[in-house]
Image (spheres, rainbow, N blue to C red):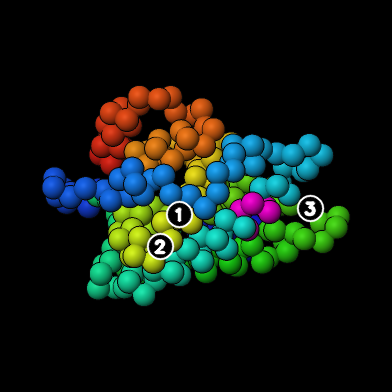
Amino acid sequence: MGKGYIMKSKGKPNGKKPAPEEKKLYLEPEYTKSRITDFEFKELVMLPREIDLNEWLASNTTTFFHHINLQYSTISEFCTGESCQTMAVCNTQYYWYDERGKKIKCTAPQYVDFVMSSVQKLVTDEDVFPTKYGKEFPNSFESLVKKICKYLFHVLAHIYSSHFKETLALELHGHLNTLYTHFILFIREFNLVDPKETTIMDDLTEVLCSSSGSSSNGSGNGSSNSAGAQNHVKER
């Protein structure tokens, strides 16, 4: 495209072992069962007949961007440079890379701002997300959608990892669970995010998506998913 749409980030272990006594609150059964709807999301994400694939990807990606941005805004006052000095999810830390490829170590709110600003630019660019009849999608469209979805996943994962208590206090965990389930099933349906990228949240995905018509993960895989998450962190 030649317009500087370089969006890169990379995660690596932050060297800190999670406290063994620290439980993942978002995995507690009383919270995982909370949803705002019982709709079958597996059916909702499937490409409808006579709808162009790129149109479907564009529509859903834009919608997820707005919803995830809104979800994050509900806890943004708690996500500060002091409380979240790095963009961390469990024991993985993410870095942002600017258009020149320079690695930027940033706080979580800075990282999220980079993500939302970059995505906002893309989804409002007629050359990338065309809305006018007859306008073609760029050849790089699918790869851009994949990058967008990867960063949106980072934001969702950070909310769960660092701000679930606040989400719970606001009684918005049902909204968060519903959004996460819908998003994960969507990116799986179209292979938009490398499974290695999402392994870090496989324990939650298994619980939420197994009850939402997803057959991607079989039942009884909790221990293997946990081991996979550990391997994922080591590899990165």
Coordinates of residue 26 in the picture (x, y in percent)? 33, 50
> Is residue 59 highlighted in magenta?
yes
Query: From the viewer's perspective, is residue 171 above or below residue 177?
Result: below
Q: Secondary structure at mark 2?
A: loop
Report the side of 231 relative to 114 (left or right).
left
* Percent coordinates x, y for residue 87 in the rendering: 32, 60
What residue did someone put label 3 on?
A: 136
Among numbered discs 2 and 3, the one appearing first in the sequence: 3
**Vertical comparison of 235 with 106: above or below:** above
In the image, what residue type sits under mark 1?
Gly
Q: Residues within 10 Å of mark 1 (few under 14, many from 20)?
A: some
Furthest toward the front, the residue is 30
CB atoms of marks 1 and 2 within 8 Å: yes
* C-alpha gap between disc 1 and disc 3: 38 Å
Closer to us: mark 1 or mark 3?
A: 1
Task: Bin the neighbour count of mark 3 within 10 Å (Cα to Cα): few under 14, some 14-19, many 20 and up.
Answer: some
Q: Along the line of sight, which residue is nearer the eye, 189 or 193?
A: 189
Give the structural element (helix, strand or loop) at label 1.
helix
Q: Nearer the viewer, residue 220 or 3?
A: 220
Q: Which residues are magenta?
A: 58-62
Give me the C-alpha separation between circle 2 and circle 3: 42 Å
Above or below for 143 versus 68: above
Q: Which residue is mark 1?
A: 174
Name the residue rendered at 55%, 49% in the picture: 37
Nearer the camera: disc 2 or disc 3 = 2
Give the number of the disc on residue 171.
Answer: 2
- The location of residue 175, given as percent across then percent down, is 48, 56
**Camera-side residue: 194 or 45?**
45
Quarter containing the N terminus: bottom right
Q: Amino acid at mark 2?
A: Glu
Residue 97 visible to an observer of this rendering: no
